[in-house]
Image (cartoon, helix red, strand yellow):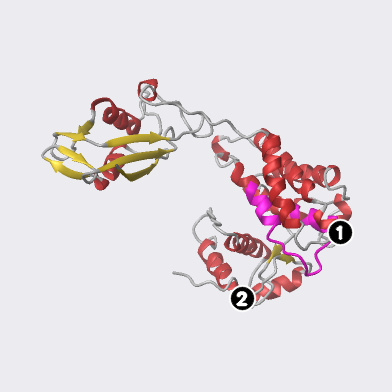
Amino acid sequence: AAKKPIQLGFSAKTSAMMTQDIMDGQLGKRRKGVFGPPAGQTAVVFVDDMNMPEVETYGAQPPIELLRQLVDTGGYYDLKEKSWVTIVDTIVCCAMGPPGGGRNGTTPRFLRHFSLLCVDSFADDTLTLIFSTVVEASLNSGYPADVASCASSIVNATMRTYREAMRSLLPTPSKSHYTFNLRDFSRVVQGVLMQRPGDGFGGRAAVMRLWTHEACRVFGDRLTDDADRAWFVRHAKTMCQDVFREDFESSFDGIRPPDAKETNYATLRRLFWGDYMSPADDEDRPYSEVPDLLELQQRTESYLVMFMFAIEHVSRIARVLRMPGGNALLVGVGGSGRQSLSILAAEMAGYSLF
C-alpha cells in the first residue's frame, strides 16, 4: 500500500494538543468516529526527538502519553466533541537520542510497543576514513602539493577538536546550546573546502589559518564566557603546533592587535575569510583570507557605517549564506542588529530578500 508520511518534531514545549492537532489535520474521516489516511494508503507518523517533551509534575510527558494511547487502544478522544476517535491504517515510527542534554527518559510502557534499533556513534577510525576521503579528493584537484599534503592534518585536527569540545564544553542550564554533533565536524571540513585552488593560496601556514578560522566559526562562536574562549585558544594552539607543525604565534603576526603580547581570542577575532571582498555581481567570488582589516571596514562601510563587532557578525552571516544548506540562528536582545546585519550580509552576497 502507498504510504502517507506525517512528520512530527518534538521539543521541550510540545504539548499533547499540538500533537493531536497536527495528526488530525493530516488524517481524513472514513466514517462516523473513524479517521485515517485516504483509502488504500497507510499513514506513517514519524516522530523526531521523541523524548524531548518536558516532564510534568507527576512524571508523565503528555505528547508521549497521547501516542501511547493511540498505539495501545487504536485511537484517542476528540477534544471538541468529547467522543472517541478510532485511528486506522496508521503506523508510528519514532527517533530519539539518549537521555541528557535536554532529552528525558521515556516510559517503558510506550517503548514496549516498538522494535528498538540502536545506532551507535561512529568510531574515530570510521570518521577519519570518511572525511579523509572527501578532503583528499578535493585537495588533490588543483591545489599545490604543500596544501594537498595537509589533508590528514585537517581531518585529524577537526576530529580532536570535536572530541575535546564534547568532553570539555558540557551543556549547563546557562549553556544549554553547548551540544555538539557530527554536523559541527562536517561544517569545519565544508568551510575549509570552500577555499578554491589559486588566488595565491598555498603553504601549510595558510591551511592552518584557514582551519583555525573555520573551527572558530563552528566551535568558538558558540562560546559565551572568557574561560571557554581561553580554552579554545589553548586548544587551537595545540592543534597548530602538534598537528599542522606550524608556529602559532608567528602565523598570526599580521593580525595581532598592537597591545597584545601573544595570540589570544582578540587576535582570532581579527581573522577573516570570506567572498565579500569581491563585487556581488562577479560570477567567481573566491573565498579567501582578508589580510587588510581597513580594506574590509571600507568595504562594509560602502553600505553602512560599521564598527568591528558588527563587521564580525556580518562576516559570520556571509559565511553561512555561502554554504550550501547553511542555516543560522541569531540570538540577541531587541535592537542588537540581527535583522540589519542579515540584510546587509544578503546584500553583499548579491541575494534578494523575501
Instruction: Look at the image and give the residue range highlighted in magenta.
Output: 186-211
Foreground mark, 1 or 2, reads: 2
Looking at the rendered structure, the kind of residue marked 1 is Asp
Residue under numbered circle 2: 280
Viewed as shown, does residue 72 lie left or right of 209? left
Image quadrant where residue 182 sits:
top right
Image quadrant where residue 312 sits:
bottom right
Residue under numbered circle 1: 253
Q: Is residue 214 visible?
A: yes
Q: Is residue 243 above or below residue 146?
A: above
Q: What residue appears at the point 78 percent right and 68 percent down from the top-left corner?
A: 198
Q: Can residue 252 be seen in this view?
A: no
Viewed as shown, does residue 278 lie left or right of 72? right
Looking at the rendered structure, the kind of residue marked 2 is Ala
Q: What residue appears at the point 69 percent right and 35 percent down from the top-left corner?
A: 124
Q: What residue appears at the point 59 percent right and 46 percent down from the top-left corner?
A: 183
